[in-house]
Image (cartoon, rainbow, N blue to C red):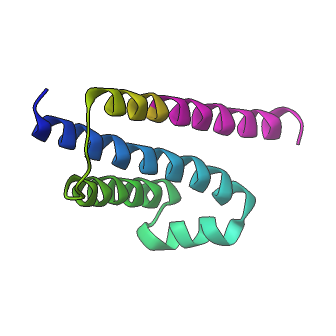
């Protein structure tokens, strides 16, 4: 694969990792800590909209920055990072699901 393509894939995966982790943390935090949820609501009229805009901004900003950081990349490194993205996203989905299930049935 061309070096430029590897840099683009690496940058996009890094941005997606940060966005995924932010979404997981901010979703749970906004339910636990009401001032955070209020701040998100005040920011752009609804906490979901604010989380979406912030996570999209993080994704694009970090992808842009990471693209220009010199790093020796190969397909194996990219594959490892894509698996990291998969597992972090999976853990995020499970964490959010467990949190809401717990509050629905037990709290």
Q: Residue at x 54, y 36 (%)?
A: 88
Which corner quadrant of the image does residue 68 belong to?
bottom left
Q: Residue lying furthest right in this view? A: 106
- Reply yes or no: does residue 106 show up in magenta: yes
* x and y percentages locating residue 50 in the rendered image: 44, 61
> Compared to 6, does 60 lie above or below?
below
User: Does the magenta segment cover residue 102?
Assistant: yes
Q: Nearer the viewer, residue 88 or 40?
A: 88
- Outermost residue, front direction? 72
Count the marks. Answer: 0
Instruction: Give the left or right position of residue 99, taking residue 65 as reference.
Output: right
Which residues make up the magenta segment?
86-107
Q: Position of residue 55 (x, y in %)?
A: 40, 54
User: Toward which corner of the image does residue 54 lie, by quadrant?
Assistant: bottom left
Residue 87 percent coordinates (x, y): 54, 30
Residue shown at the point (24%, 58%) measured from the top left: 69
Dominant secondary structure of the residues highlighted in magenta in the image: helix
* Residue under the point 67% across and 72% down: 35
Q: Nearer the viewer, residue 9 or 107?
A: 9
Q: Nearer the viewer, residue 92 or 50?
A: 92
**Image height of 92 relative to 31, above or below:** above
User: What is the quadrant of residue 70 in the picture?
Assistant: bottom left
Q: Residue at x 44, y 51 (%)?
A: 18
Q: Quadrant of the N terminus?
A: top left
């Amino acid at each position: 694969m061309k070096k430029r393509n590897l840099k683009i894939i690496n940058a996009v995966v890094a941005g997606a990792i940060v966005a995924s982790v932010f979404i997981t943390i901010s979703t749970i935090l906004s339910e636990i800590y009401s001032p955070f949820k209020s701040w998100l609501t005040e920011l752009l009229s609804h906490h979901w909209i604010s989380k979406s805009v912030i996570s999209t901004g993080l994704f694009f900003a970090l992808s842009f920055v990471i693209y220009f950081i010199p790093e020796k990349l190969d397909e194996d490194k990219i594959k490892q990072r894509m698996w990291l993205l998969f597992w972090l996203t999976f853990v995020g989905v499970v964490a959010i699901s467990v949190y809401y299930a717990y509050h629905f049935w037990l709290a």
